[in-house]
Image: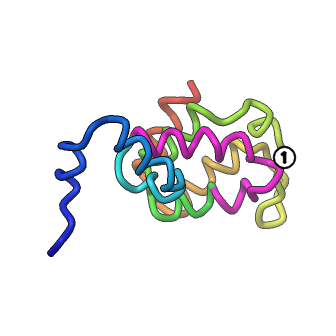
Amino acid sequence: MIFDMDMLDNLFPEIKDQIFSFIPVSTLKVTNSIYFKQYMDIMCKKMGTTVNVDTYFRNIIRYDNGYVLNVILERAPVTIFRRHITYRKTKMTFIEYINTLTIYYGASKCRKHMLDNLK
């Protein structure tokens, strides 16, 4: 018998809350955008301390994940964008770094979201 997620909709809300309390947000993030945004709130609080920010943004831009970049740009602390990064022996601001990566990887979706959010 294959488990169908629609069966959870037939349960009482109290039981559903108990079931979902055991599933970590990092696992739920792939199920829908509500859980993804909750996960990104947690990740944005950790940015700069436990998350290597430049590598994280580079991977997002490399795979042209426009939605993910848009959510991060909405939630990321302002202090991240004040950083200076040395990339390919050139020192630049974080915004210039993101712009350079979008051009280098040809990430048109990410570039569009970046230009829309950072006007």
Quadrant of image for the C terminus: top right
Residue beneath disc 1: 84
- Is residue 36 located in the magenta-colored stretch of the structure? yes
Segment colored magenta: 34-56
- Is residue 5 located in the magenta-colored stretch of the structure? no
For image coordinates 84% across by 53% down, the residue present is 91
For image coordinates 80% across by 48% down, the residue present is 48
Residue lying at the far bottom of the rendered structure: 1
In the image, residue 111 lies at what x, y percent? 48, 45
Q: Main secondary structure of the magenta part?
A: helix
Per the image, label 1 sits on a secondary structure element best described as: strand
Horizontally, residue 40 falls left or right of residue 54, namely left
Horizontally, residue 119 falls left or right of residue 65, namely right
Q: Amino acid at mark 1?
A: His
In the image, residue 102 lies at what x, y percent? 54, 54
In this orientation, which residue lies closer to the viewer: 50 or 13?
Answer: 13
Residue 67 versus residue 62 in the image, above or below:
above
In the image, residue 35 lies at what x, y percent? 45, 43
In the image, residue 38 lies at what x, y percent? 53, 39
Mark 1 Cα-neighbour bin, 10 Å: few <14, some 14–19, many ≥20:
some
Residue lying at the far top of the rendered structure: 119
Quadrant of image for the N terminus: bottom left
